[in-house]
Image (tube, rainbow, N blue to C red):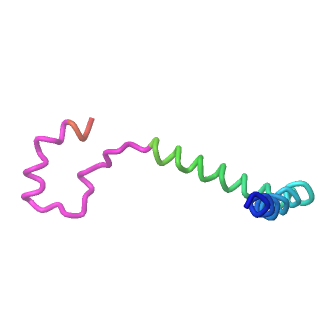
């Protein structure tokens, strides 16, 4: 049982280490993609959660009347 786990670890880890040591150019793009994803996530989290609700597609009169009391809170 232990031998199977050791062999599985070797089979999974050794190729990754070989690629990281022998071909770092293949590993670098993964870091670039991860960095880009993290930056994009930070940008998305920095966006205000309340979008401009007056640009909503359904501007029916009932919707406008219901939203009039909210206008001061939405539009600073």
At which x and y percent is residue 61?
8, 59
Above or below, 18 against 72 in this view is: below
- Quarter of the rendering containing residue 76: top left
Q: Residue at x 46, y 41 (%)?
A: 46
Outermost right residue: 22
Query: Residue 2 or 57: which is nearer the viewer?
Result: 2
Left/right of residue 29 with respect to residue 50 in the rendered view: right
At which x and y percent is residue 69?
11, 41
Query: Residue 54 or 19: which is nearer the viewer?
Result: 19
Question: Number of labelled discs?
Answer: 0
- Quarter of the rendering containing residue 27: bottom right
Q: Residue at x 46, y 44 (%)?
A: 45
Above or below, 76 against 68 in this view is: above
In this picture, which residue range is highlighted in magenta?
A: 47-72
Answer whether residue 59 is magenta in the image: yes
Query: Residue 25 or 64: which is nearer the viewer?
Result: 25
Left/right of residue 43 with respect to residue 9 in the rendered view: left
Query: Residue 25 or 13: which is nearer the viewer?
Result: 13
Answer whether residue 35 is magenta in the image: no
Q: Residue at x 43, y 44 (%)?
A: 47
Q: Residue at x 81, y 64 (%)?
A: 11
- Image quadrant holding the N terminus, namely bottom right
At which x and y percent is residue 8?
76, 63
At which x and y percent is residue 59?
17, 60
């Amino acid at each position: 049982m232990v031998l199977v786990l050791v062999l599985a670890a070797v089979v999974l880890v050794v190729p990754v280490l070989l690629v990281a040591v022998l071909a770092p150019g293949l590993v670098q793009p993964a870091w670039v993609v991860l960095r880009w994803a993290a930056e994009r996530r930070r940008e998305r989290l920095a966006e205000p959660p309340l979008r401009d609700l007056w640009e909503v597609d359904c501007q029916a009169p009932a919707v406008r009347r219901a939203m009039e009391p909210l206008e001061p809170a939405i539009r600073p």
